[in-house]
Image (cartoon, rainbow, N blue to C red):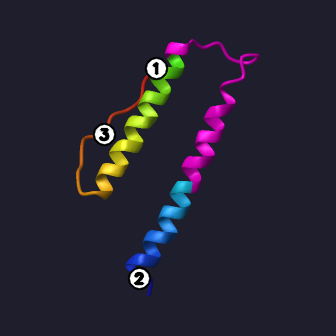
Amino acid sequence: METKREKFVRIVEARTNKIISMVRLLGNCANKANYDYTEADVQKIFTALEKEVKLAKMKFSGADEGEETFKL
């Protein structure tokens, strides 16, 4: 039987690697030859990402806030 620690490690590793992969894919959108975006768009994207990282960190310290969906 899997312990709580083993379950945590298995799930967190998978989810963290998935998030890292998605951030790398997001970075591909920086190619100006293929996409048109403004500095304001970039700021909005990274503000949203930073906010969600901050909220996730707060959850680990016991605090919790509502979730929002990103929209450009």
* CA gap, disc 2 and disc 1: 41 Å
Mark seen at residue 67 = 3
Mark 3 and mark 1: span between their CA atoms?
16 Å
Residue receiving disc 1: 72
Up-down relation of residue 71 to residue 8 (above or below) = above
Against 3, residue 14 (above or below) is above
Which one is nearer the viewer's eye here, 43 or 65? 43
Mark before the other along the chain sequence, 3 or 1: 3
Circle on res. 3:
2
What is the quadrant of the N terminus in the image? bottom left
Dot 2 or dot 3: first in sequence order is: 2
Q: Residue furthest right?
A: 33
Label 2 CA crowd tier, 10 Å (few <14, some 14–19, many 20+): few
In magenta, the rendered stretch is 17-40
Q: Amino acid at mark 1?
A: Leu
Left or right of residue 42, residue 1 in this image: left
Identified at 43% across, 70% down, the residue is 8
Question: Which numbered disc, 2 or 1, marks the residue that appears first in the sequence?
Answer: 2
Q: Position of residue 27 (x, y in %)?
A: 65, 33
Q: Name the side, left or right, on which 51 lies relative to 13.
A: left
Give the amino acid type for the residue marked by disc 3 in the picture.
Glu
* Element assignment for label 3: loop
